[in-house]
Amino acid sequence: MSWTDAFMDIPHVPGGRSRAGADCFGLYAIVLEEAAGVTVDRYAHARFGATGAGAIATAIARGDWRCIARGEAGTPGLPLALKQAARRFDAVLMTAHVRVAGAWRRADLHIGCAVGNGLMLHSEGGAGPQLVAIDDPSIAHRLRGVYRPAALTERAA
């Protein structure tokens, strides 16, 4: 049994922010609150007209989050570097495909939660919560960065 087992039964629901159903950002917020005792704004994306990842970008600009490591998706060596940099409860930013004006493009739209030992918990449509290695080939090509909420940084200080 792992502490992450408590989150594996949360169904993936686009835009969801509760145990009844959560998307990637909703799952991350729930894990932070319940396992780390840290609250992040679950609805920031709605106010800023952005995805969870966009909400993180806005929070970084405000100084609420800290960039730990980042790079271009698909860069050789980046998955290992991010795996080594990630600390429990850090956000792992990934790309995803989105349809814009009838065309598909890749954007920083998906996050997971680093859980330690090089693993992360994330949730995507059709699969729900999954525990995978940060450098797993199924996601390694999508990795963009590792970010830490300021509340975690302050607590560690």
Image: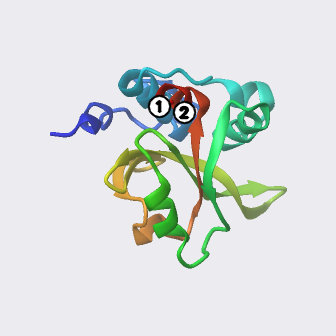
The image quarter containing residue 136 is bottom left
Please provide percent x and percent y for residue 128. 39, 44
Looking at the rendered structure, the kind of residue marked 1 is Ala
- Disc 2 and disc 1 in contact, CB within 8 angstroms: yes
Q: Nearer the viewer, residue 43 or 66?
A: 66
Determine the secondary structure under disc 1. Answer: helix
Q: Does residue 129 show up?
A: no
Q: Quadrant of residue 73?
A: bottom right
Q: In the orientation shown, which residue stands out farthest toward the bottom?
A: 76
Locate residue 8, reporting x and y percent.
Answer: 30, 38
The residue sitting at 68% across, 30% down in the picture is 64
Residue type at mark 2: give it: Thr
Q: Secondary structure at mark 2?
A: helix
The residue nearer to you, when weighing 134 against 149, is 149
Q: Is residue 80 above or below residue 25?
A: below
Query: Which residue is disc 2 drawn over?
Result: 153
* In the image: residue 58, left or right of residue 123: right
Q: Which residue is mark 1?
A: 156
What residue lies at 60% left-to-right and 30% top-to-bottom?
Answer: 150
Q: Residue at x 73, y 63 (%)?
A: 104
* Nearer the observer, 4 or 66: 66
Q: Is residue 2 above or below residue 134?
A: above
